[in-house]
Amino acid sequence: MEIYKKGEGKLTRRVAFYGLLILIVWGFKDLSLWLSRWEVWRHVLVGGFPVPVYEQRLTTGVALCIVLTVVAAYLCFKWLNGPKIGQLLIDTETELRKVAWPSWDDARQSTVIVLIFVAFTAFYLTVVEVVLKKIFDLILI
């Protein structure tokens, strides 16, 4: 299993993989719950011990979903380490390292300014709506 440009873009590849892995596990966990509607997928395997992530007993449906999860995780890993996506993630990490992130004081000041502007805009639109409603009520009634 060859990784495209090994050692570059480690952080973005890791974040992308684990984010997609969470979605994959969540999706197949829901699939296992959906499959449990049918009797054929509820057959208990190996004593039916509880599977931690799936929070269910080991049944044929859960076993199928575990196999599908492993296959999907492998395909996701291969996809993220291919030339096209791998280069995109490497370039993304390179560009993110160039970003000049604001200090906490700058971020706090900007947030306060945005909140004040949003409050002013909400107040202004409320006043305009009330005034226009009264004008239209006088005209139409």
Image: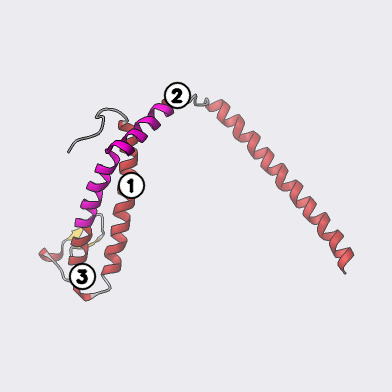
Amino acid type, mark 3: Trp
The residue that label 1 is drawn on is 20
Q: CA distance from mark 3 to mark 2?
A: 51 Å
| The magenta segment | 67-96
Residue at (30, 48) in percent of width and height: 21
Residue at (79, 51) in percent of width and height: 128
The mark that comes first in sequence, 3 or 2, is 3
Badge 3: residue crowd in 10 Å (few <14, some 14–19, many ≥20): some
Badge 2: residue crowd in 10 Å (few <14, some 14–19, many ≥20): few
The residue that label 3 is drawn on is 41
The mark that comes first in sequence, 1 or 2, is 1
Image location of residue 106, percent across then percent down: 57, 26
> Which structural element holds mark 3?
helix
* Mark sitting on residue 98: 2
Q: Is residue 69 above or below residue 36?
A: above
Q: CA distance from mark 3 to mark 1?
A: 26 Å
